[in-house]
Amino acid sequence: MWTTFKMALLIGGLAFSSAAMSSSHEAGKQPDAAKSERLKVGLVLGGGGAKGAAEVGVLKVIEQVGIPIDYIAGTSIGAIIGGLYATGHSAAEIDTMFRSQKWLSLLTDRNEYRASSVISTEDSTTYVLGFPIGRKPRKRRTIGIMRGDHIVHLLDSMTGQPDSINFDHLPIPFRCVAADMKNRKEVVLRNGHLAMCMRASMAIPGAFKPVVMDSLVLYDGGMLNNLPVDVVRAMGADVVIAIDLTQNKREARDFSLRETLGIGGIMDWMVSRPDLVKYNQNRRNAEVYINPNLSGYGASSFSKQKIAEMMNIGERTAIINRKSLEKLKKRVELGVR
């Protein structure tokens, strides 16, 4: 009996000792597991019209390096490229889209079937050489020449998201930036009709009609936040890769027409440039900042030759920054904050 009792104590002690060692071993592994959890990467795509072709070139190198992208924020053309990338299109696919478009027709809503007619009318719309110049007036009048219907149709077909959605549910969570110039406030779009939100982000005042959403009248987000590093940080990014298309860097101005003369809206923005403070903060707050030299190219440089040249410039610039990208990849994999 006593022998049996001693044997039971011995077996129980061994079991407890084994469990304690196992627990201690697991506890010892926890810090290593926490260290190995990789960092979340945010990709920021700035605005710049046709110069966005350079962003496609940079994306090719990011893919070659193998950096995982967890969040995307874009403005204007950056919202177009970012939205397509977020829905699963590769850099090569976006490259093909950029090169194959008839950009003049796409951006101006030109009717190719009526291009040979000097003047024609269809559905209350008057066309001159295929370009729409007069439509039935809407309830709310807005400033801008082009409606951007064709580009919305293109983006609808490419994103495969014709309905209202939460942008967190895309393959890569996405945000695009627009500007409510009536109240001079930045609007971060995180849900809704994806193609229309992308279109709102690129509504250059005077060129494109703004997008009206509820009580908001939305223009190009580049007017208030052309490089939304802060937006992708707010999404949860630990580290950021920012692609900036701005060529002429300027410091903020301490002057406002609104405060001085009571003149607000776009005129006040043109003089005071309230976006420059945030822009300068954001470009300094990215772990990898890529700024292709696009001197000689403009927002309207949509010819096939210039698009090809700007893509090559973007790719070459990213190759120059490849070591920085590779270092960032290692940091991301090791979880080093």
Image: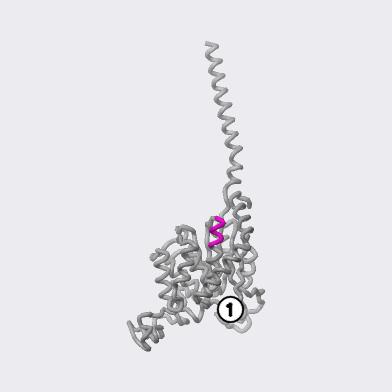
- From the image, give the main secondary structure of the stretch colored magenta: helix
Residue at 39% across, 87% down: 128
Is any atom of residue 284 visible in this view?
yes
Magenta-drawn stretch contains 61: yes
Residue at 59% across, 30% down: 21
Q: Relative to 310, does residue 172 appear above or below in the rendering?
A: above
Magenta-drawn stretch contains 315: no
Number of numbered markers: 1
Q: Position of residue 8 (x, y in %)?
A: 53, 18
Is residue 171 or residue 163 the one in the foreground?
A: 171
Looking at the rendering, the stretch of residues picked out in magenta corresponds to: 60-66
In the drawing, does residue 293 fall left or right of residue 175?
right
Is residue 119 or residue 213 the one in the foreground?
A: 119
Identify residue for label 1.
269
Within 10 Å of disc 1 (Cα), the crowding (few <14, some 14-19, many 20+) is: some
* Badge 1 amino acid: Trp
Residue at 56% across, 29% down: 19
Residue furthest bottom in the image: 118
The answer to which image quadrant residue 57 occupies is: bottom right
